[in-house]
Image (cartoon, rainbow, N blue to C red):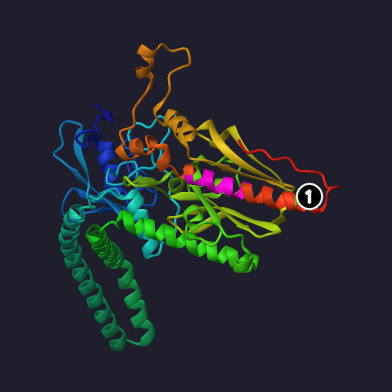
């Protein structure tokens, strides 16, 4: 059979040749393992660094592969069986769960995924290494963590195995210490009994001929150190998983309260930055504008055009995050716009707001006179919202100022119906009704399904339409007052439809 090998991935067993078996004995790094073993991991889509440590048991045909990945180290157990003809069976078993792969962890929720991505199971998103504070972590858990806690059982098993290996390593380490200590003691006696230089020569000569004692000591020290560090890491990870499992996901009401608090705080900070006196604001019914000082719009970040300032910088995973608790949808990222109206000016502030991280992107802020607002336009736009999505038709309200446009895509039935088509698929336009269903892949996510079927009265766009109508009313009112005073001024165009 020579070096011919066969793989059985389902049972995590492979057959390795005699040549590969000998290579395995000499390997100390993953990159030094036989190609058949490296290919096994690659075919399982398991990413292991080339400098990952390969640890061989002293007395058995067993190895541990230590992959120092983040956020948790990964450990794989390798064991060879009895030789049959020219091959050895090799068992490969994962000792700790792979929490680094979002694609393989069913205990993590997904955000929005689109049909164009053609996901097979789950779609994994690139992670951003960032330290979250307690509230931010709780918000991330709310959006992404399933109620089922991560089970640290596999860590317990790995800790037991490392304890067992550690005892064997420590026994050999103590023997090597004794040998080195004995050699040093004899060396000191020789140096004291013989003339100084002669004693050093004798000790150096003996050290050269007994150099294997020091090599073995160094090796056993390094291996013992690896075992201790791995054991310490496993115990810390176990405690982290136990703490994470014992923590409860915050309630829908708590998340709504946090969102309300953060919007109000941002509203106050924005209002102060404009240095407006509250008594100068045009009064608007609180039932329309809510509890903020100004008029605020909180739209879904994902449906805003990709050309909107700041959208490309947002973390992809958070942009797709959503939850629907039956009363109102909650999103990972919002597009926030604040307007403050006085008798002579309109103050506009906009940004994307990552609710999970409490972070702003693409902030724009400026004071305008009513004459600098050219028109307010309601329009249907076919905009690119996401590189995967292509174009998607949405209702947008566009504020045309003298120096820029402020566009707000509304999460109304038009947007949700078109978004649903991008998620589930739509039949070609000329498809007969009785054949249309075969082109559609209904979402298996009940929260997403309920979100896409919300009644218009429950959508944020319904409230926003009232707010924009109010802005339009006051703008026209102030504009008419200005042009009555200055008849020669050109009348700006007004369109709200």
Q: Residue at x 42, y 57 (%)?
A: 259
Instruction: Pick the quarter of the image with the C terminus.
Output: top right
Residues rendered magenta in the picture: 463-472
Q: Residue at x 55, y 55 (%)?
A: 295
Res 141 quadrant in image: bottom left
Q: Is residue 471 a member of the stretch shown in magenta?
A: yes
Query: For the stretch drawn in magenta, what is the main secondary structure?
Result: helix
Instruction: Pick the quarter of the image with the N terminus.
Output: top left
Check the image and name the residue furthest to the right.
488
For the residue labelled by badge 1, is the local secondary structure a helix, a strand or a loop? helix
- Taking the image as drawn, is residue 425 in sight? yes
Residue 166 coordinates in the image, percent (x, y): 19, 63
Residue labelled with disc 1: 483
Residue 333 coordinates in the image, percent (x, y): 47, 50
In front here: 491 or 161? 491
In front here: 115 or 405? 405
Determine whether 394 is above or below 106 in the image.
Answer: above
């Amino acid at each position: 059979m020579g070096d011919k090998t066969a793989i059985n991935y389902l049972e995590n067993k492979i057959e390795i040749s005699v040549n590969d078996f000998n290579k395995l004995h000499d390997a100390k790094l993953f990159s030094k393992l036989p190609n058949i073993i490296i290919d096994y991991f690659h075919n399982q889509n398991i990413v292991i660094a080339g400098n990952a440590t390969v640890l061989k048991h002293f007395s058995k045909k067993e190895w541990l592969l230590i992959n120092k990945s983040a956020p948790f180290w990964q450990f794989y157990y390798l064991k060879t069986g009895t030789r049959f003809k020219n091959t050895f069976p090799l068992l490969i078993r994962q000792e700790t769960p792979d929490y680094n792969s979002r694609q393989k962890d069913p205990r993590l929720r997904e955000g929005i995924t689109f049909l164009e991505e053609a996901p097979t199971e789950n779609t994994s998103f690139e992670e951003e290494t960032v330290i979250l504070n307690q509230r931010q972590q709780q918000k991330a858990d709310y959006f992404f963590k399933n109620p089922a806690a991560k089970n640290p059982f596999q860590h317990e098993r790995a800790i037991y195995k490392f304890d067992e290996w550690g005892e064997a390593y420590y026994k050999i380490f103590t023997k090597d210490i004794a040998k080195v200590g004995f050699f040093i003691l004899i060396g000191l006696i020789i140096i004291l009994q013989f003339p100084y230089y002669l004693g050093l020569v004798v000790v150096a000569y003996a050290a050269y001929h007994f150099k294997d004692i020091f090599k073995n000591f160094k090796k056993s020290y390094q291996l013992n150190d690896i075992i201790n560090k791995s054991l310490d890491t496993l115990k810390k990870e176990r405690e982290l998983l136990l703490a994470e499992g014992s923590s409860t996901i915050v309630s829908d009401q708590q998340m709504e309260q946090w969102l309300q608090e953060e919007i109000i705080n941002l509203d106050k900070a924005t209002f102060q930055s404009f240095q407006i006196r509250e008594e100068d604001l045009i009064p608007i019914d609180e039932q329309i504008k809510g509890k903020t000082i100004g008029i605020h719009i909180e739209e879904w970040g994902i449906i805003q055009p990709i050309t909107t300032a700041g959208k490309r910088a947002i973390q992809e995973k958070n942009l797709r995050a959503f939850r629907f608790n039956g009363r109102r949808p909650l999103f990972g990222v919002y597009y926030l716009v604040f307007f403050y109206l006085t008798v002579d000016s309109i103050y506009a502030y906009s940004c994307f707001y990552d609710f999970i991280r409490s972070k702003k992107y693409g902030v724009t802020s400026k004071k305008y006179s009513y004459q600098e607002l050219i028109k307010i336009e309601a329009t249907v736009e076919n905009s690119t919202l996401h590189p995967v999505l292509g174009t998607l038709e949405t209702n947008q309200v566009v504020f045309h100022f003298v120096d820029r446009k402020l566009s707000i895509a509304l999460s109304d039935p038009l947007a949700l119906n078109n978004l649903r088509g991008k998620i589930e698929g739509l039949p070609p336009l000329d498809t007969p009704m009785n054949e249309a269903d075969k082109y559609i892949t209904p979402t298996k996510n009940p929260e997403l399904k309920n979100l896409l079927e919300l009644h218009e009265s429950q959508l944020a766009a319904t409230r926003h339409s009232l707010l924009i109508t109010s802005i339009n009313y006051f703008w026209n009112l102030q504009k008419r007052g200005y042009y009555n005073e200055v008849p020669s001024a050109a009348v700006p165009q007004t369109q709200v439809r």
